[in-house]
């Protein structure tokens, strides 16, 4: 699979993540999750869960590094490096590494001169002579000349490259789901393979760490800019959401986008990434999580043989020490966007495993869902909102937040809806919370947590996240903590964290010219989803409609269609899956028709 195909397939994978697991296997959830744990001499940690129902396994190599670890001035470098580990090594991806290496060194020497000229263009921009240093039409003659020289060197290097060899090897050996992801707090690389390809997995993944080559680095940097345009700049609210995050997080590095600020991404060099790799991609900063059909003793043997070759890092990663100060006044954000009017209210919360996290989770659930307080008040009683207004508590590694979102019905104002929401918050602080209401939301959260652990990929991701942010045992601890939450706990955290002086409010108004542009069928689907997911879903649907690989789309249909008749799909998620399947079928038909016409 090419990098372009990986980026095309990623929206489908993300969509499946939003919908939930579609292929489930038996899990002994009553006993809790108890992975085998082992640490190599170089610091690499292994978490192993044997499940022998199917002859396959999924492996995820997770690194304790994300965008919050980006050094000052080079935001986006963690995400940038994620792309680099698909480029191969001294062995994979090349026909003659030594010849290729000499060309890479020449490229770096030329790029150093280009960076100096880029800095000169930035100075010209500050004086008003250039409006956009990233616009090729505004480049200086010197920069254009060096860019032509670089392109020549790149073409010479490509004569020695074996494009996408890593993906091709995995695919030829039955691999699936090969991908990666970077978030604020972690980076993960994962693939699913047949059980008899265990040693291949260990050789391939350790080789990526032992001798990575930053091939086509500056080409990939341009691809990151394109990814930013797709995921942020081209979505209805992408740029506004990014600005809202920056407003909410005034000091903490969570306020910087995972993709990085465009001006800083343009300045990242191959040397920057190499130094970042030495510190953050050492085995002592990583965990290998495996779930599926394997023998743990054999896995440990292979891990020592292959990953044991990778030396421990010489420098420990620096800690994240910046803390968000408590806001001293309410912050408000207004924007006109190509979306329905909506309200978003966000409060600072707590980090994962904080003693108040469980109570905040329950508080959010009391407000959410079709039987939640917000739906009853905003939709049923006031007829002021559409879809499913709701709340979510997000507790990350270093900090967290509780967010409430609602989409405004035509004829009502965001300010009206905001006031209704604040009224319901006041009732949580001071009013009655019945035992029945409390137990209902606890049951819902417990059921959801169990569903996520039934599939091998779902369990692998949960182990990776919990262990990177806190400890894997939180999979078992979190439900127990939630069951102990009382009504008094909910009222207490409401009074403590939902302080009017500390909230940040975003109000989106609809651009008049965009009011009638949305697909009515998609609008109906979005009405059932939380407003904060609308932009992401729209971007993924748009990308599906642009995908040109019919075979990959067919593979996704084979995975998604059985879920519609399985009886396991929650009713509130089924319309999104049905719409996605319809879009994929239509796109496949278009591609097949075009192929027939060209024959």
Image: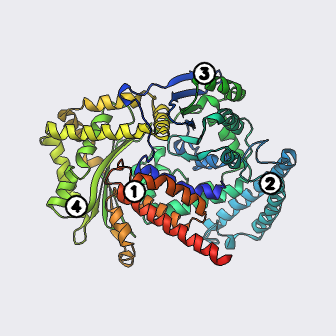
Residue 320, x across and y down, in percent: 51, 36
Number of residues whose C-alpha sits closer than 10 Å to that of mark 2, classed few (under 14), some (14–19) or many (20 or more): many
Q: Which label is found at residue 107?
A: 2
Q: Earlier in the sequence, mark 1 or mark 2?
A: 2
The colour scheme applied to this rendered structure is: rainbow
User: In the figure, is residue 205 to the left or right of 90?
Assistant: left
Q: Are marks 3 and 1 in contact (CB under 8 Å)?
A: no
Q: Are marks 1 and 4 in contact (CB under 8 Å)?
A: no
User: Secondary structure beneath disc 2?
Assistant: helix
Q: Which label is found at residue 533?
A: 1
Which of the two discs, 4 and 3, sits closer to the camera? 3
Residue occupying image coordinates x 32% and y 47%: 392
Q: Earlier in the sequence, mark 3 or mark 2?
A: 2
Q: Which label is found at residue 298?
A: none
Q: Nearer the viewer, residue 255 or 465?
A: 465
Q: Is residue 234 visible?
A: no
Q: Earlier in the sequence, mark 3 or mark 1?
A: 3
Task: Please tell me in which quadrant of the rendered image residue 387 appears.
Answer: bottom left
Q: Are marks 3 and 2 in contact (CB under 8 Å)?
A: no
Residue occupying image coordinates x 47% and y 66%: 583
Residue 447, x across and y down, in percent: 31, 39
Residue at far left of view? 432
Residue at far right of view? 99
Which residue has dot 3 on it?
297
Cα separation, mark 3 vs mark 2, equals 45 Å
Q: Nearer the viewer, residue 205 or 407?
A: 205
Q: Earlier in the sequence, mark 1 or mark 4?
A: 4
Which residue has dot 4 on it?
417
Cα separation, mark 4 vs mark 2, equals 56 Å
Number of residues whose C-alpha sits closer than 10 Å to that of mark 3, classed few (under 14), some (14–19) or many (20 or more): few
Which of the two discs, 3 and 2, sits closer to the camera? 3
Q: In this rendering, is residue 379 above or below 319?
A: below
């Amino acid at each position: 699979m090419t990098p372009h195909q990986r980026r095309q397939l990623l929206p489908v994978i993300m969509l499946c993540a939003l919908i939930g697991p579609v292929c489930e296997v038996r899990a002994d959830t009553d006993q809790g999750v108890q992975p085998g744990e082992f640490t190599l001499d170089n610091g690499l940690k292994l978490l192993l869960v044997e499940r022998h129902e199917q002859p396959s396994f999924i492996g995820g190599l997770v690194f304790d590094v994300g965008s919050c670890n980006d050094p000052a001035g080079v935001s986006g470098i963690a995400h940038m490096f994620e792309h680099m580990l698909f480029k191969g090594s001294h062995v994979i991806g090349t026909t003659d590494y030594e010849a290729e290496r000499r060309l890479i060194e020449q490229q770096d020497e030329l790029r150093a001169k280009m960076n100096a000229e880029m800095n000169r263009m930035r100075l010209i921009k500050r004086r008003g002579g250039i409006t956009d240093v990233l616009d090729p039409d505004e480049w200086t003659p010197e920069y254009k000349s060096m860019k032509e020289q670089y392109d020549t060197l790149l073409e010479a290097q490509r004569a020695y490259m074996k494009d996408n060899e890593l993906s091709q090897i995995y695919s030829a050996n039955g691999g699936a789901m090969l991908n990666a992801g970077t978030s604020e707090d972690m980076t993960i690389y994962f693939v699913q393979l047949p059980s008899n390809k265990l040693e291949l997995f260990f050789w391939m993944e350790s080789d990526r760490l032992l001798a990575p080559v930053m091939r086509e680095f500056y080409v990939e940097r341009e691809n990151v800019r394109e990814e930013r345009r797709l995921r942020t700049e081209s979505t209805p609210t992408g740029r506004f959401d990014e600005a809202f995050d920056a407003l909410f997080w005034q000091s903490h590095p969570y306020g910087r986008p995972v993709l990085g600020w465009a001006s800083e991404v343009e300045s990242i060099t191959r040397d920057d990434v190499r130094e970042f790799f030495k510190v953050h991609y050492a085995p002592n900063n990583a965990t290998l999580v495996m779930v599926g059909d394997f023998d743990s003793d054999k896995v440990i043997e292979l891990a020592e043989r292959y990953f044991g070759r990778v030396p421990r890092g010489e420098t420990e990663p620096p800690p994240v020490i910046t803390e968000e100060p408590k806001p001293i006044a309410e912050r408000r954000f207004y924007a006109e966007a190509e979306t329905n009017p909506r309200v978003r209210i966000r409060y600072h919360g707590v980090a994962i495993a904080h003693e108040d996290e469980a109570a905040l989770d329950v508080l959010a659930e009391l407000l959410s869902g079709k039987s939640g307080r917000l739906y009853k008040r905003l939709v049923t009683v006031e007829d002021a909102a559409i879809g499913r207004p709701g709340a979510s508590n997000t507790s990350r590694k270093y900090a967290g937040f509780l967010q409430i979102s609602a989409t405004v019905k035509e004829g009502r104002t965001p300010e009206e809806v905001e006031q209704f929401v604040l009224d319901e918050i006041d009732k949580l602080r001071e009013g009655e919370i019945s035992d029945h209401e409390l137990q209902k939301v606890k049951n819902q959260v417990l059921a959801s947590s169990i569903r996520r652990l039934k599939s091998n990929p779902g369990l692998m991701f949960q182990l990776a996240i919990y262990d990177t942010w806190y400890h894997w045992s939180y999979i078992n601890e979190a439900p127990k903590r939630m069951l102990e939450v009382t009504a008094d706990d909910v009222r207490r955290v409401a009074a403590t964290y939902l302080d009017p002086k500390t909230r940040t409010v975003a109000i989106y108004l609809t651009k008049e010219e965009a009011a009638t542009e949305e697909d009515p069928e998609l609008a109906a689907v979005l009405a059932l989803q939380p407003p904060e997911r609308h932009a992401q879903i729209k971007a993924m649907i748009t990308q599906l409609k642009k995908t040109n690989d019919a075979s990959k789309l067919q593979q996704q249909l084979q995975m998604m269609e059985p879920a519609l008749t399985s009886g396991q799909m929650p009713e509130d998620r089924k319309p999104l899956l049905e719409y996605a399947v319809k879009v994929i079928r239509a796109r496949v038909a278009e591609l097949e028709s075009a192929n027939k016409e060209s024959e």
